[in-house]
Structure formats: C-alpha cells, structure tokens
Image: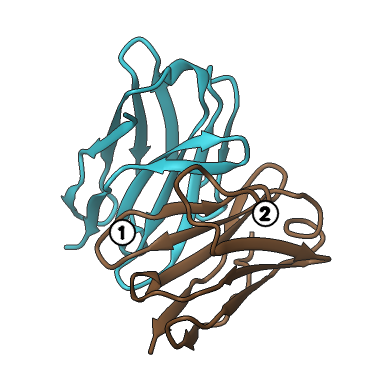
Amino acid sequence: QSALTQPRSVSGSPGQSVTISCTGTSSDVGGYNYVSWYQQHPGKAPKLMIYDVSKRPSGVPDRFSGSKSGNTASLTISGLQAEDEADYYCCSYAGSSVVFGGGTKLTVL
Amino acid sequence: QVQLVESGGGVVQPGGSLRLSCAASGFTFSSYGMHWVRQAPGKGLEWVAFIRYDGSNKYYADSVKGRFTISRDNSKNTLYLQMNSLRAEDTAVYYCAKVRGYSLDYWGQGTLVTVSS
C-alpha cells in the first residue's frame, strides 16, 4: 500500500495546458483501468474529476482529460483558468485496497 | 441531491476510542459501497477502509488494520468507523465517500479527529 508518486507542484499560465503524472506499479495503476483524479480546494472536500482513467463525471469541464500508459496515469488540464488552482490527487484500485497519490499543487500564474 | 454528513470527531487521548458516523441521504444508501478516507493536517489523502453495499466485505489500510472497524446500518442510512487504540498519527480530517464503480464520487465535508494528551 505505498502511495502513488505525483510531482509536488506544477504551474501554468491562464490558457495554457498542464499535465500531472501519477506513477504506480503493476499492482495498482498498471494492473487496472481504475484510476481516478480528485480536485481539492483549500478547506474543501475532494471532488471527483476523472474516473476509470479517462471518463468525466457530468458537470466536469472537457478541459480535464485523463490517460494511462503502463504504470503511469496522467491528468491534463487545458485552457487553464484561475479556478483550477488547487491540489490534485490520483487514486487507483489495487485489488483489496485503494491507494492515493501524494498530491500535486497546481498554481495558475 | 447526495448528502454525506460526518459527525463524532473530537479530541481524544492516545490509546482512546472514538466512533465516527456518516449520515447519507439523496441516494439509495443500501446499494452502494462506502469508503472512509483521512487527511492529516497539511498532508495528502489516505484511504482508510471500504465496506461493500451489504456489509459482506470490509477492507482496511495496513495502518489501521486491527484497530479500526468499518460498519453500516442500511436501515438508518448510516456508515460508521469505530476507532480504537488511537495514536497521534491518526490525527486527521476523516471523510466518508460514496462509491461509483471504482472511484469515489461524493464526499462529505469531513470531521476532525485530534489525538493528543
């Protein structure tokens, strides 16, 4: 049950695109197509942004997209907006458990 | 609309016990698995436990196995987390979350547990 590896921080200017990586193992990210991504603003509960690697829940802008290759999943946010500034966490099913990434702080410059 | 409201947090001494509750509404509670996830102050999310929709299977993080027990009462639309032998490192905001397949689609606002003497 080791945490997935995410960069501590990423940044981008409004309108640009950023990608956040999430690296696991063949026992979690690489073994299942069950990676999800969560956005968390300070003092707020996490919000589901992407599930099953690349699916978007209703209401999530299509600027948010997900993908996976091998043991690494990625979240891409295009057309950055000020309100996208938040912490982002990846999460993977791992058989009889769930594992989160350490989180990435996105700064919109 | 889906609502999850946690309660039961507070300050407890090391070695003590606490029971958290999560009251669910706005969906058919008895049809969905539920998770507990925690977040230590200034830290990331940590999965704690999962229970299937009917309570038939329960899974725990290694860090809480043998000390925490997840349960549910579908007649009361309520999820529980019994926490025993609490340690300082259990200090965190505890969230309950509803399952959507293999993701967590709705989260409560969390309840703070502080383990301190």
Residue B92: give its label. 1
Q: Position of residue A13 (x, y in %)?
A: 44, 88
On the question of residue A106 being in view, the answer is yes
Position of A48 with respect to B15 (left or right) is: right
Of the pair A62 and B31, the residue shown nearer to us = A62
Say what amino acid the circle numbered 2 marks: Ser
Rendered position, A109 above or below B13: below
Q: Quadrant of the C terminus of chain B?
A: bottom left
The nearer-to-camera label among 1 and 2 is 2
Q: Where is residue A74 in the image (x, y as percent from the top left)?
A: 66, 69
Circle 2 SS class: loop
Say what amino acid the circle numbered 1 marks: Ala
| Tag count | 2
Q: Position of residue B65 (x, y in %)?
A: 52, 45
Numbered disc 2: what chain?
Answer: A
Q: Quadrant of the N terminus of chain B?
A: top left
Position of A38 with respect to A85 (left or right) is: right
Residue at x-position 52% and y-position 35%: B99
Cα separation between marks 1 and 2? 30 Å
Of the pair A81 and B85, the residue shown nearer to us = A81
Chain B drawn in what color? cyan
Do the residues under discs 1 and 2 have CB atoms within 8 angstroms?
no
Position of B74 with respect to B32 (left or right) is: left
Residue at x-position 40% and y-position 83%: A107
Chain corresponding to brown in the figure: A
Numbered disc 1: what chain?
Answer: B
Image quadrant of residue A18?
bottom right
On the question of residue B66 being in view, the answer is no
Crowding around mark 1 (Cα neighbors within 10 Å: few <14, some 14 to 19, many 20+) is many
Which residue matches tag 2? Answer: A54
Crowding around mark 2 (Cα neighbors within 10 Å: few <14, some 14 to 19, many 20+) is many
Of the pair B76 and B108, the residue shown nearer to us = B108
